Amino acid sequence: MMTPAQTLRDLLAQDKCHVMPCCFDALSAKLIQQEGYDLTFMSGFAASASRIGAPDLGLMSYGEVVDQARNITDAINIPLIGDGDTGYGNAMNVRRTVTGFAKAGCASVMIEDQLAPKRCGHTPGKAVVGRDEACDRIRAAVDAREALRAQGGDILILARTDARHEHGLAEAIDRAAMFAELGADILFVEAPQNEAEMREVCAALPGPKMANIVEGGATPDLPNAELHEIGYAIAAYPLSLMAAAMQAMVTSLRSMRDDARPGQMDFVELRRRIGFDDYYEESEKYVSARRDID
């Protein structure tokens, strides 16, 4: 059977830029799959907000993040890229992180070069570790990937650098190039400031590249066709679903306070999307399950 990692490799081999809405829990991931998207990413920003109601400032633990990823992969069969942040410690922690995400069913894991505690890539105050430590993280991630392969497992390494913010685009490109030489499968230079910088990133670096599009963030929100022409293989939208969901919930709460009923998904579709209809159909094979439903 095709592994999630191999499915992701096949997608990246296609001549297109994949639109990747990012999820934050099992339900949001399920909706992404139901709407026909080929892959998704567990946004650390959105998952932290959803799971612990707190900002993405390194507050979620490794165990909480892996548990969230496992819940998501249990609900979908499209590839999930997990946010492994800084790897949660030194190089040996990075190895454990990569192995844990693979065992949780992730097709890929992102490892970045920020100084812990990390910050959202489009918020102030972020800093990166030195080149040696950054390379150690990716080297450890690649070593973990190879160890998994030797045991029949598989995962891709998405290597991210946030060096553009502190040290300029040239340093960010140099770091990403080193990550590629170390064996990273996908490269992610966070927060280029304009289209010219995005083009420079893609022209300078080998292999699949990911763009991170935060509405109102530092990177231009370009049409998908243009992102493909520039050279990106993935366009991630980390906050689109969470922002839409939060706006809808706030609107509903304000309407209810005024004794109004806001427009919402009808109950029949709600049940279907969550999976009630599939459950009922499958349970028809079992007498005891039918009795429980009745």
Image (cartoon, rainbow, N blue to C red):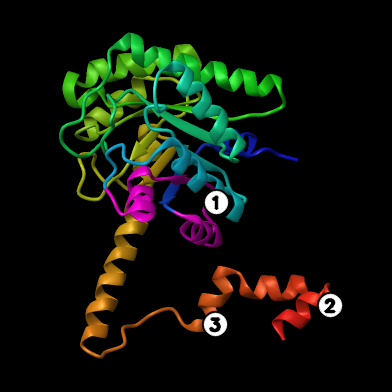
Compared with 102, 247 (above or below) is: below
Q: Compare residues 50 and 61 and report the one nearer the observer.
A: 61
Classify 10 Å Cα crowding around label 2: few (below 14), some (14-19), many (20 and above).
few
Residue 150, located in which quarter of the rendered image? top right
The answer to if 148 sits in the magenta stretch is no
Q: Which residue is mark 1?
A: 71
Mark toward the viewer: 2 or 3: 2
Q: Measuring 30% from the left and 18% from the top, which residue is drawn there?
A: 173
Asked if residue 76 shows in the view, the reply is no
First reached walking from the N terminus: tag 1 or tag 3? 1
Measured Cα–Cα span from mark 1 to mark 3: 24 Å
First in sequence, mark 2 or 3: give its number.
3
Q: Which numbered disc flags the more N-terminal residue, 2 or 1?
A: 1
Q: Amino acid at mark 3?
A: Val
Residue, disc 3: 268
- Magenta region includes residue 41: yes
Q: Which residue is mark 2?
A: 287
Three-letter code for the amino acid on which mark 1 is drawn: Asn
Measuring from the top left, give residue 46's x and y in whole percent: 35, 50
SS majority, magenta: helix
Residue beneath the point at 30% across and 44% down:
213
Outermost residue, top side = 132
Image quadrant occupied by the N terminus: top right
Q: In this view of the protein, which residue sits in the foreground, 284 or 52? A: 52
Inter-mark Cα distance, 2 to 3? 25 Å
Estimate how packed mark 1 is, as few (under 14), some (14 to 19) or many (20 or more) residues with alpha carbons within 10 Å. Answer: some
Q: Where residue 114 appears, x then y in whole percent?
A: 29, 25
Magenta-tinted stretch: 25-54
